[in-house]
Amino acid sequence: MTVSSSYLSHLKDLFAPFGEITIRKMFGGAGIYCDGNIFAITGEDGLWLKADDVSRAEFENAGCERFTYEFENGKTGSMSYYSVPEEVFDDSDALEHWTQLALGAASRSIKKPKKSAKKR
């Protein structure tokens, strides 16, 4: 799942209108962050956007496929990321729509710090 530097640069430019885009390589692929929140992952065979209970149905209804991977023991795992519709790369309105869904899922997934108990 190795990705080229030129492809990562292309993705950084593609998502630049949405905020500060950073990319961190991991496991042969990369995580794509907007303003510090991971909202997409990429590898040699695709780009996947983050989904959650609020947005998952829209990804599934569009025919997007869930990100899956295989463990060494042959079992399959998955993450809550879905492939992007092809029009994302050619249509700015589609890019805006799908990216906003992913950014929304990313922001909802941020763990809020627990408030410490007040001392009496």
Image (tube, rainbow, N blue to C red):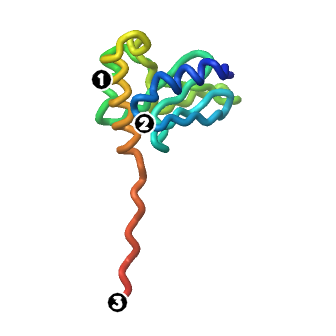
Q: CA distance from mark 2 to mark 3?
A: 43 Å
User: In the rendered image, which residue does mark 3 sit on?
Assistant: 120
The percent position of residue 76, horizontal first and vertical second, equals 58, 27
Q: Which residue is located at x 36 percent, y 81 percent?
A: 118
Residue type, mark 2 in image: Gly
Horizontal side of residue 101 vs 86, given as left or right:
left
Q: CA distance from mark 3 to mark 1?
A: 48 Å
The percent position of residue 45, horizontal first and vertical second, equals 59, 15
User: In the rendered image, which residue does mark 2 sit on?
Assistant: 19
Return the residue nearer the eye: 20 or 2.
20
Image quarter where the N terminus lies is: top right
**Callout 3: few (<14), some (14-19), or many (20+) C-alpha neighbours within 10 Å?**
few
Horizontal side of residue 55 vs 48, given as left or right:
left
The percent position of residue 84, horizontal first and vertical second, equals 43, 18
Return the residue nearer the eye: 42 or 68.
42
Disc 1, SS: helix
Placement of 36 over or under 86, stated as above or below: below
Q: CA distance from mark 1 to mark 2?
A: 23 Å
Q: Earlier in the sequence, mark 2 or mark 3?
A: 2
Residue type, mark 3 in image: Arg
User: In the rendered image, which residue does mark 1 sit on?
Assistant: 58
Image quarter where the C terminus lies is: bottom left
Assess whether mark 1 and mark 3 are in contact (beta carbons under 8 angstroms). no
Asked whether residue 115 is in view, the answer is yes
